[in-house]
Amino acid sequence: MKARVYVTLKEGVLDPQGQAVAKTLGRLGFNEVEGVRIGKYIEVEVGDGSTRERVEEMCKKLLANTVIENFRVEL
Amino acid sequence: MKLGIIRFPGSNCDDDALDALERVLASAGLGGTIVWHKDHELGAVDGVILPGGFAYGDYLRAGAMAAHSPIMAAVKAFADRGGPVLAICNGFQIACEAGLLEGALARNDSLKFECRDVWLRIEGRPTPFTQAIPAGRVLKMSIAHAQGRYLHPDVDRLEAEGRVVFRYVTADGEAAGAANPNGSQRSIAGVTNAAGNVVGLMPHPERAVEALLGGGGEDGRALFLSALAVKRGEPARISS
């Protein structure tokens, strides 16, 4: 089965990539854009019966840097 | 004194570090040795350098994969015993990812790969790589990184503990915002761990050991000479 992991920058951590994308969206006429934050989406193929706890452990150990990033797991 | 330089797949300042050690320390009969990241033992070394580069292509995050290379368990054990570790640029990112140092290195606020000379002020608590350098001394070195914006969740504590050991300043030693090349908190260029034996910085001391090459000149020598002086138990400050 598939675990879906979303890694996002913590609130308050400046995201210059997101700012650049927001600016370009504005240039394209998307004037309603008020901000963009860029994160990562990771699909992890795991064996049946795998637990959310194990995937969260993967996030803490490798997939996310919890100093500056949050993560969310869907399983 | 022999320093072990860890070579990861994608390291590209490993040979520069080896060359720098030979240039600076050879006259004292000392130098460096390359240690492959898949090794489990450091061998007989007096210190470790985590060199710059793009270990594992910076996949996922700079330093994330290298932090779990087989050799890193030995590096952590060495650091826990008080062994001196110098983590340069990508090495600094690896050290943070491995938990050898606190904090994280995020994408530069400029969004650019910053490649230029900077000036660093020596400050904070003594470390093997800085304690023979007079506090307040300003060193010129080059940077070359896209992810060097140092962030720490409790930067006040870090400062209070004297663990900021390099700070970006102007050539005159002023901590002006314009001297900060990447948006690091408090213009932090380098930090040390609680015990003071692990030091990480984004600028490249190993690229500043030869006046002929211009750029940083020879200021980077001071870090290696400091390590040598400390190893020999010499209290003397480096004068030049």
Image (tube, rainbow, N blue to C red):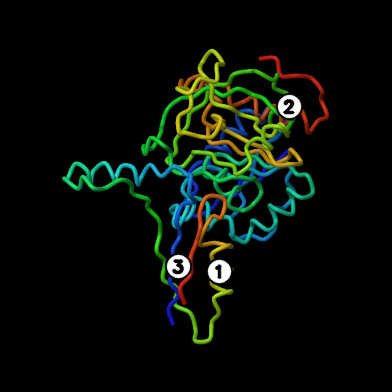
Dot 2 falls on which chain?
B
Along the line of sight, the residue nearer the viewer: B57 or B174: B174
Q: Residue furthest left?
A: A29
Q: Which residue is mark 3?
A: A5
Which percent across, then down, holds residue A13? 48, 44
Q: Position of residue A35 (x, y in %)?
A: 33, 46
Q: CA distance from mark 2 to mark 1?
A: 41 Å
Q: Where residue B171 appears, x then y in whole percent?
A: 51, 15
- Cα distance, mark 1 to mark 3? 9 Å
Amino acid type at circle 3 is Val
Quadrant the C terminus of chain B occupies = top right
Mark 3 vs mark 2: tell me if same chain: no
Q: Quadrant of the N terminus of chain B?
A: top right
Q: Residue furthest bottom?
A: A48
Comparing labels 2 and 1, the label whose residue is closer to the camera: 1
Q: Residue B131 has which mark?
A: 2
Q: Residue furthest front?
A: A32
Amino acid at pointer 2? Gln
Earlier-in-chain disc, 1 versus 3: 3
Q: At numbered mark 3, what does the secondary structure look like: helix, strand or loop?
A: strand
The amino acid pointed to by label 1 is Glu
**Mark 1 and mark 3 residues within 8 Å of each other at the beta carbon:** no
User: In this view, which residue lies farthest toward the top?
Assistant: B172
* Residue position for label 1: A56
What is the quadrant of residue B221 in the picture? top right
Categorize mark 3 by other alpha carbons within 10 Å: few (<14), some (14-19), many (20+): many
Q: Is residue B135 left or right of residue B141?
A: right
Above/below status of B78 relative to B211: below
User: Badge 3 sits on which subunit?
Assistant: A
